[in-house]
Amino acid sequence: MRLSMQIFAYGLREFHPQAEIRSNAFEIEAVRLFSANVTMEKNTLYIGRLSDLFKNGNEHVICTHRNDLLQLDTTDLEEVLNRVLDVLSFYTSWDTAMMNLITTGAMLQDLFDASEGVLGRPAFLLDPLQRHLAHTPGYGVGEVDEMWDNLLASGSCDMEFLVAFNEADPERITRKGIYSYEEPYFPNESYHYNFIIRDSFLGSATLIILDGKIHEGELDCYSIFCAYIERWFQLHIQEQDSVILDAQIRTVVSDEKADASELRRRLLLLGWKEEDPLTFLKLDAPLQPYSINTHLSHSLNVAFPNLYAITLDLSVCLLCNLRIASLEETKRQLEPWLANAKYYAAMGQVFHLADSFFLIIISMQKSRRSIVKRKWGQYMTEKTMSFLICWHR
């Protein structure tokens, strides 16, 4: 992890630093005591005394990196060195935690939770449709402003505000880097960052400044935080999300003892609700190769917002949310997909997120009828399948 001089100025604020910062490059990842015999490395922060640099300098401690300089109101070199090492350790630990979360399928809210001590202020993340994705913990209703309250209560901003804001700044989603507004569009001063990957706008983060004061080092931390979120988006755009959901659903339907809490949590963060009626549909097609199942699953996940499809053995299993789309609507929309691919389907009983997802295929029966008409307009020769999907609390 590489830090800026402003981050160290903020970390050493107890020593009232006088800063002369010109480059503020994000390059610092090591620290050492200043020595006239050592060639300065660009990735290293050097600590010494003003007298080490200037003949007429005093004994006050300084920190230098390239052309950036901090003059501290102390002569205690050891105390400053320990404090700088603490700053390095703090951000290195944060970097380790964030990278671990990003690479192990964590949710965006996990990244906000892990960054609470770094940001130190209320912040939130919205998707392209201005819907809430994540926010810093520790701030409840009535503790920030009316926009924050709307996000917590309804999952979005006030509609009148959004309309007025879009009219005031129609180009806002194309802005890059950290930006703010001089006009008081927001209840409090705030800084924003857009996530744009492959020319696609994926959302925006907002850091709220309640006291009207922010150090440049805090903004640099916010910039690093947004870089982590951007990296998450790069790894967890729609295709990656489907891979994680696929694995989680596959586990809980295949193993009765599997922990479904992470799957429930992911579905709740995606907008599903505890009381939503859910069901499984199982799709089969005689003699279809596994690759067709995989292709169908991927296509259904892209086309249907109310279901998640996985391949299981030689079948396709669909976890359907019947609140987002009713069973009749789901059947109507699925019918042409099944007809084209020669699939037939059966449905399990309705359940809820609090129930177990574990399913058991009770029976598979063959029929000697040469042609059997199915409800979904499918014809099968020489066999039919009947089964029951059961959930155990």
Image (spheres, rainbow, N blue to C red):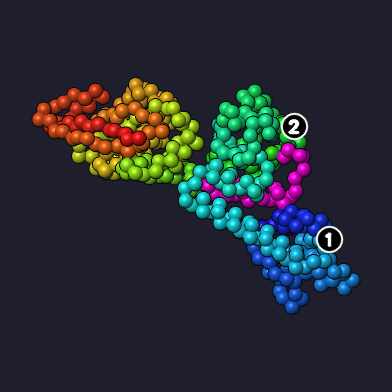
Rendered-image quadrant of the C terminus: top left
Q: Is residue 293 left or right of residue 129?
A: left
Task: Give the overall secondary structure of the magenta segment.
Answer: helix
The spot of residue 220 in percent (x, y) is 69, 51
Residue 371 seen by the camera? yes
Farthest residue to the right: give it: 56
Using the image, tell me which numbered label, if any, was put on residue 297: none
Question: In this orientation, which residue lies closer to the viewer: 186 or 202?
Answer: 186
Q: Quadrant of residue 388?
A: top left
Q: Residues within 10 Å of mark 1 (few under 14, many from 20)?
A: some
In the rendered image of this protein, does residue 41 appear above or below residue 392?
below
Residue 340 seen by the camera? no
In the rendered image of this protein, does residue 97 appear above or below residue 258?
below
Which residue matches tag 2? 184
The spot of residue 361 in percent (x, y) is 24, 36
Using the image, tell me which numbered label, if any, was put on residue 73: 1
Q: Is residue 162 left or right of residue 337?
A: right
Farthest residue to the left: give it: 368
Residue at the spot 75% in from the left edge and 33% down from the top edge: 183
Residue at the spot 63% in from the left edge and 51% down from the top edge: 224
Q: Quadrant of residue 293?
A: top left
Farthest residue to the top: give it: 328
**Which one is earlier in the sequence, the residue at label 1 or at label 2?**
1
SS assignment at label 1: loop
SS assignment at label 2: loop
Residue at the spot 66% in from the left edge and 46% down from the top edge: 119
The spot of residue 369 in percent (x, y) is 11, 27
Q: Which residues are magenta?
A: 209-233
